[in-house]
Amino acid sequence: VVGTCGKSTVTAMLGHVLTECGLDPMCVNGANVPGWEGAVSFGKGQYAVVEVDESDKSLVAFKPYAAIVTNASADHYSKEEMDEVFDSFIKDCQGPVVDGRGSLESLASLETLEVPVPGKHNLQNAEMAVRMAVALGVPPDRAIAAMKTFRGVERRLQRHGANVYDDYAHNPEKLKAMWTTLAEKHPA
């Protein structure tokens, strides 16, 4: 899983869905995930779900079977340079590629997708994770049902008490998603 924003959440979501659907993947995330051993889940199935960072462009050394590109924006580099790096990352994928940079074609069955973590951005993250799970052979109804039990990622709009949230948002897109979500949850 690569992209400028959403990598940790999509990695955790995909790992959760595949685990709940019996595929038992090994997962390596850039953030701690409730129910995992910190940022790792040591599954024994045929898949590994890995968050790969773009900050030093080393992601092009990976040769994944399948890939999710969550999005691309100017963060460590220009958007155009990020697009080139992500294109290089996915060019040799032999399996499915889910790319949130373009328009997401919704699966008809995803109209019922419910995500227990707030924000429209998390609905998009969940859709990418579910689309990949389905592309890897998980029945859509099972993937959608598994997403309902997703518990989130630490420091990703993580609620602590009544109105205290912790979030790792650190670029304009992430800050906008966080503020928009909080404004919708707690209107003035």
Image: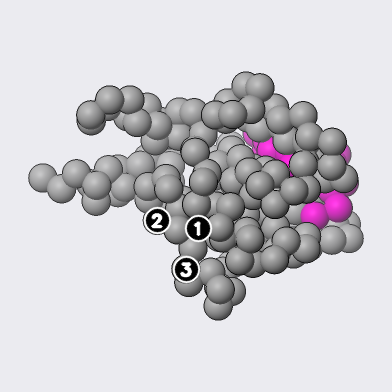
- Residue type at the position of mark 3: Thr
Label 1: element kind: helix
Q: Is residue 86 above or below residue 127?
A: above
Q: Residue at x 70, y 27 (%)?
A: 40
- Residue type at the position of mark 1: Gln
User: Farthest residue toward the bottom?
Assistant: 108
Residues drawn in magenta: 49-66
Q: Residue at x 61, y 66 (%)?
A: 141
Q: Position of residue 23 (x, y in %)?
A: 78, 48
Residue 177 is left or right of residue 98, and the answer is left
Residue 28 is left or right of residue 157, and the answer is right
Q: CA distance from mark 3 to mark 1?
A: 13 Å
Residue that badge 3 annotates: 112
Prevailing SS of the magenta stretch? loop
Discs 3/2, front: 3
| Nearer to me, 109 or 131 | 109
Q: CA distance from mark 3 to mark 2?
A: 14 Å
| Nearer to me, 156 or 14 | 14
Residue 77 lies in quadrant? top right
Label 3: element kind: helix
Quadrant in which the C terminus appears: top left
> Label 1: few (<14), some or many (≥20) within 10 Å?
some
Residue that badge 1 annotates: 124
Residue that badge 2 annotates: 120
Q: Position of residue 102 (x, y in %)?
A: 59, 67
Q: Is residue 71 visible?
A: no
Residue 164 is left or right of residue 42, and the answer is left
For marks 3 and 2 on the same chain, the one whose residue lies earlier in the sequence? 3
- Residue type at the position of mark 2: Lys
Q: Residue at x 34, y 31 (%)?
A: 159
Question: Mark 2 and 1 residues: CB-CB less than 8 Å, in contact?
Answer: yes
Q: Is residue 26 visible?
A: yes
